[in-house]
Amino acid sequence: MRAWQVQELGEPLDVLRLESGVSVPEPGPGEIGIDVAACALNFPDALLCRGAYQERPPLPFTPGLEVSGTVRSLGPGAEARGLRIGQRVAAQPTLASGRGGLAEVTVAPMANVHPVPDSLDDAAAAALIVIYQTGWSALTRRANLQPGETLLVHAGAGGVGSAAIQMGKALGATVIATAGGPAKVEVCRALGADVAIDYQAEDFVAVVNEVTGGRGADVIYDPVGGDIFDRSTKCIAWEGRILIIGFTGGRIAQSATNHVLVKNYSVLGVHWGNYRRYEPEAVDRWHDELMDLHARGLIAPLVSQRVAFEDVPDRLMAIINRGTTGKLVVDVG
Ligand SMILES: NC(=O)c1ccc[n+]([C@@H]2O[C@H](COP(=O)([O-])OP(=O)(O)OC[C@H]3O[C@@H](n4cnc5c(N)ncnc54)[C@H](OP(=O)(O)O)[C@@H]3O)[C@@H](O)[C@H]2O)c1
């Protein structure tokens, strides 16, 4: 079968190789084999190529965090998940052993495989896992966002940001989004943001404080970190919650705990992937809730580009070079 492989660490364009003679992975105990239809690209795919992600599969490995497709085979014991051969599913492949989703066939632990309704096409099904689960767990579980509160979403036109705007609106919040440049600001507005700020051209702190009458944002969703985190502490509300989602800006900020005390706010870590390990039943519940939100028209992934299988390295470079919006989804099968 065909699969993208990383044989040495580096930039995606330099180290990804399209191999055509890769042996088809067989599901082990508790695993499910999947014929991949689509694989959504994520910023962490580029980090995996660089060896800079929290998971470091042994070389050579296939990246690809999330796929849609059909059940091809069931490993021993995996029938307990209640899925049948041929059923349409969305899944997170077994990355730790290097068998990611940028391949014609992949395998996933059965707990990472979820049924999807026919109303969801392959691209949307692949794109509705990581960024939505991350946002839903962060906003509902970690930050307990309430209707009527103000949510500030940084990098609102990106993957996790675009999903957070939609979910913030679905939860009844007023959503302020930031993004780099006028075109991305328009994307945030189209996604439902009540206020959108070009944070490369304007001081977002001043705008947030003005829009909220000086109170600040109740919840801040921060996938950027660095200076953006530092500045966010200047517009967080009394008893506000800052969600640490990622570090695309490159610098990991330090939190001044005296300031946390004085303004009575919380800095909340979000590592959604580990809910798979510590509380898999929560991930199942969130999947059902997200399917329901989608069925009610409250969320829908912004699939900005359908990517040919051969174009994966080029598109991963575009993601890390800040040149994309929403989700890029690779057509595999
Ligand atoms: N905590 C979790 O459980 C979890 C789950 C999934 C993803 N993540 C993390 O969330 C982050 C975003 O992932 P994503 O898939 O949404 O990525 P993405 O679609 O590429 O969006 C990231 C955005 O970050 C902004 N950005 C600001 N400074 C940047 C820089 N120096 N280089 C690149 N981008 C920069 C860009 O928006 P502007 O141009 O508008 O600034 C870019 O669009 C990543 O760090 C990822 O690892 C965390």
Image (spheres, rainbow, N blue to C red):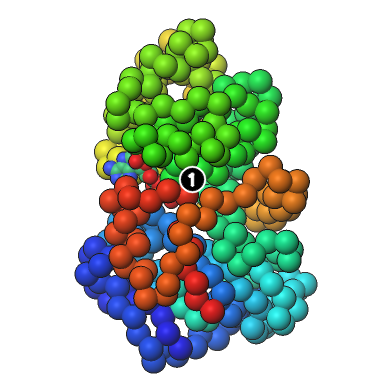
Looking at the rendering, in which quadrant would you find the C terminus? bottom right
Q: Position of residue 140 (x, y in %)?
A: 64, 36
Report the quarter where the N terminus lies: bottom left
Q: Position of residue 14 (x, y in %)?
A: 22, 69
Quarter of the picture for ligand 1?
top left
Residue shown at 52% from the left, 13% from the top? 212
* Lateral position of residue 137 relative to residue 294, left or right: left
Amino acid under label 1? Val
Apparent side of residue 323 relative to residue 73 in the rendered image (left or right): left
Residue located 61% across and 42% down the image: 136
Q: Is residue 274 visible?
A: no
Residue 74's place in the image compared with 326, above or below, is below
Asked whether the viewer can see residue 262, the reply is yes
Q: Residue at x 58, y 31 (%)?
A: 143
Query: Which image quadrant is residue 127 in?
Result: bottom right
Horizontal and vertical percent for residue 283?
A: 65, 53
- Binning the other alpha carbons within 10 Å of mark 1 as few (below 14), some (14 to 19) or many (20 upward) gives many
The answer to whether 178 appears left or right of 9 in the picture is right
Label 1 CB less than 8 angstroms from ligand 1: yes
Left or right of 277? Residue 15 is left
Q: Where residue 98 sits: x, y (%)?
A: 42, 73
Residue occupied by mark 1: 160
Q: Could you tell me which residue is drawn at 45 percent across and 12 percent down?
A: 209
